[in-house]
Image (cartoon, helix red, strand yellow):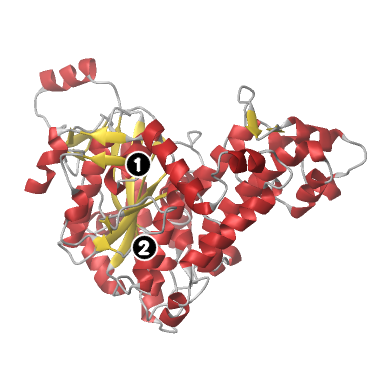
Amino acid sequence: ILGGKLTYEFIRLNLPGSLPHLSLLNSLISSSDSRISEGEFRFDQLQKHFDSLNVHYAFGSEDCTGIVKRIKYDSTTNAFTGFPSLLDRGVPIKSYYQTDSFDTLKLWFNSIDNASLLNVHMIQPVPSTDNSSISSPYLLSAYGIDNTATADDILQRWWYIFNQSLQRNIRIIGFSTDADPKYLRAMRLMSGFLGALTNFQVHQHPQAFQIKIKSHWSWFYLREQQLLLFFQDPTHLVTKWRNRLLSATAELYIGNQSISINHLHDIIENDTYSKLDHGLTKSDINPKDRQNFSSCFKLTSNDLFNILNADDDTRGTLLYLRMLKMIIVAYIEKTTTIVETAYLSVEINAHNLLYLISLVKQKQLPPQALHIHIFNSQACESIFRNTRALSGIYSTIVNFTVHDFLRRAQRLSLLNEIKCKQLQNGSVDNLVFPIHYKHRVERQSSFTHSQREIDEIDIEQVITDAYHQALDMLEGIDILNLLEKNDVLELKPLSEYLFRQLNFDSKKHNYSSQICNLDDE
């Protein structure tokens, strides 16, 4: 699995009798529980995996990636892969493209476009109280799609995953995806965040969470009952924040201050400063490189902030980048304590984060549920990278087809299963796998809170401190004068004003009859 077929054959030939033949090994892999079929949700295998870990809480994620558009025949399922999966209430129909008729196959090729994307679902176990390490995410399902799914399909699929997992004693706390508009709409509709499912009261489910919200929390826009919590993937959120700054068409202002990439260009080209002073290069602010996540850390360095702070004309850009740093600290850095995370939260993530803290404070969830840095969709991105890395050394094609992914993901799942059993066993005779020192640290819990420490968190004080810090950041910009002139400077009237504006501009409703029938299943 790690070295590929040539490496395995080299070791087997030079150590006679030490390893089985490759055909026997492939047969063992094919007969294992790690076999993955397109469109199949492996809930039974997930249950076995969670039972072995002794965990019951999990967080789901979903994402898609571009693939090679090619149809292949899968002999193990007697089905063709590479067509876009047909969805039944958001859930793909397993082995739909099975036929013994050449005419039917010809019709499919002539009338159906090949799948252009691969959609995957990952389940991240929440650590138990007696386990300090964070287990690897589990691949639940994978299938080809054509990007025609709607927000209705997505939330119906989440509903299906939640119920099927619950039947197996696995409580899905929530889901995380990137900031795609369809996913964001599904999140808002299901959580009631400036939106509503008119024909389906999902929050009235018997297993829904419920917290006590004080009447004077004017700044909290979520309802008391929530079946699932949702987080936008922080890495996607950070890169989108950066790309907005680098956009050639967007004109950003905060008060009377402009937010411009030209301020950073001037710093890089200024002979007064060297790279040692600001740490930036031209590639860090290249708008064509839209996935340059590492540059986000350079754009939020204290050295750059000091240079921007020295010029009154760059205050807007400074504030924009400081907010970017808050997102990184809140949801990506693993050393951030939960109090600091709540202090620095933004948007829908902030409401769901505060809701999650309240659930732990009210003892509806264990303290281990506050490992915020694992509640993202990077598990999907990781399996995409690892699967592409399994390309043979003589292959010039880095990307994969649906069939290639299913075959490679099976080997990755088997490898993760072996590693998991080795960690759980604790024997001195275990196999030792090479692990990068950064990854070794990342798999350990970054903090361990006791229930008493969480009980001492004063949410209202955290919000008040965040409000006053925001006032300090806006000092010297005419926004404060404008808010004071309209009597909305204080926290309560400001929160009520923002809610009215957001509710008027972006309120979303869903009247779908399909959603109405979900509770009948």
309 or 383, nearer to the observer: 309
Q: Is residue 184 shown left or right of residue 103?
A: right
- Name the mark nearer the viewer: 1 or 2: 2
Q: Amino acid at mark 2?
A: Lys
Dot 2 alpha-carbon crowd within 10 angstroms: few under 14, some 14 to 19, many 20 or more: few
The residue furthest left is 520
Q: Can see residue 418?
A: no
Q: Mark on residue 214?
A: 2
Q: Position of residue 386 (x, y in %)?
A: 46, 49
Q: Position of residue 210 (x, y in %)?
A: 27, 63
Badge count: 2
**Mark pair 1, 2: CA separation:** 19 Å
30 or 458, nearer to the observer: 458
Q: Amino acid at mark 1?
A: Leu
**Residue of label 1:** 194
Q: Going from the N terminus, do you reach mark 1 or mark 2 first?
A: 1
38 or 324, nearer to the observer: 324
Q: Name above or below for residue 388 compared with residue 261.
A: below
Dot 1 alpha-carbon crowd within 10 angstroms: few under 14, some 14 to 19, many 20 or more: many
Residue 366: image quadrant is bottom left
- Identify the residue at image location x=47%, y=79%: 453
84 or 465, nearer to the observer: 465
